[in-house]
Amino acid sequence: MTEISKAEFDVLNALWEGYPASANDIIERLNKQKDWHDKTVKTLLSRLVKKQAIKFESQDRRYWYSPLIERESYVVHESKSLISRLFEGRVAPLVAGFARDDSLSRQDINELKALIEKWEKDNG
Amino acid sequence: MTEISKAEFDVLNALWEGYPASANDIIERLNKQKDWHDKTVKTLLSRLVKKQAIKFESQDRRYWYSPLIERESYVVHESKSLISRLFEGRVAPLVAGFARDDSLSRQDINELKALIEKWEKDNG
DNA sequence: ATTATATGATTACAAGTGTAATCTAGTTCG
DNA sequence: CGAACTAGATTACACTTGTAATCATATAAT
């Protein structure tokens, strides 16, 4: 997987919301959060195509874009990369940092407990 | 906090191992893992100084570097930044990704359980 | 005193990034 | 038909990053 920059990620993220999507669809979705010129978004779309993160098909005199990588696998990849750089590859120290920083909510705790329970059921 | 690049982080990380440290100390520490020219390391040290991530004091005709930011706060900051971009700020979905990807070890699980127990004792 | 050495400062330079503006070629409006 | 409008392609441009090489200066060695 080629590196995807932060701005490119925002575009890709908007595409994941629903596809195939035209450039204008993406621009509209992004306008809710970002203050980007439409030319900027189109540049980022082109760069994502060149990086083979997305593809397009021509139809009705316009391009319809779709992702070539799944959100799930991308975010797992990115998470692992960060965790390997910062925490020698283990996830618990990251969570520990959040805990020390008082950044865990009751909801986080409950979800973690559920995950652990499932893991133990599956992995004995 | 200014952005710290990946290469800069590796240098900063070596400095966190022990300081004050001279450029040569850092170069030696890094040689164990990286294959960087000493000029490269010195460039990165200068950039870290300019970014106010580290400082130095002159002594014996050489600079003695020390971090200006703590590892703990830096890694928490970076983790939060990633988690807010990828998971709307909540840590559990990240762990869930690891779980689905079969990337959790028994040790991870045990540490997470201990964290949760402590959290509940403190926040119960 | 002159030369070699070591250290930091300055300069280099291509690729990637953020952030667009301009160019080009169909398409639609008058 | 010619003008205006679209959508994508190409170009722009400064800043960052990776990865050093060269310059300047102060000691150390001869």
Image: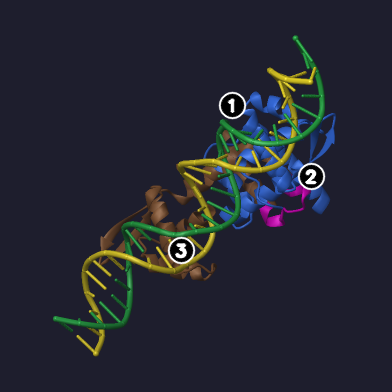
Chain colours: A blue, B brown, C green, D yellow
Q: Which residue is mark 1?
A: A35
Where disc 2 sits, the SS reads loop
Amino acid type at circle 2 is: Leu
Q: CA distance from mark 2 to mark 1?
A: 26 Å
Residue at position x 47%, y 69% in the image? B37
Check disc 2 and report the residue beneath it: A68
Q: Secondary structure at mark 3?
A: helix
Q: Chain of mark 1?
A: A
Q: Mark 1 and mark 3: span between their CA atoms?
A: 37 Å
CA neighbours of label 1 inside 10 A, class few (<14), some (14 to 19), many (20+): few
According to the image, label 3 marks what residue? Answer: B40
Instruction: Chain letter for mark 3, please.
Output: B
Q: Sort mark 3 into few (<14), some (14-19) or many (20+) by Cα contacts within 10 Å.
A: few
- Where is the C terminus of chain B found, in terms of image quarters? top right
The residue positioned 66% from the left and 33% from the top of the image is A41
Please say if A30 is above or below B67.
above
> How would you rate the neighbour count of disc 2 (Cα within 10 Å): few for under 14, some for 14-19, many for 20 or more?
some
Residue B71's disc number: none
* Residue A3 within the segment the image draws in magenta: no
Q: Which residues are magenta?
A: B97-108
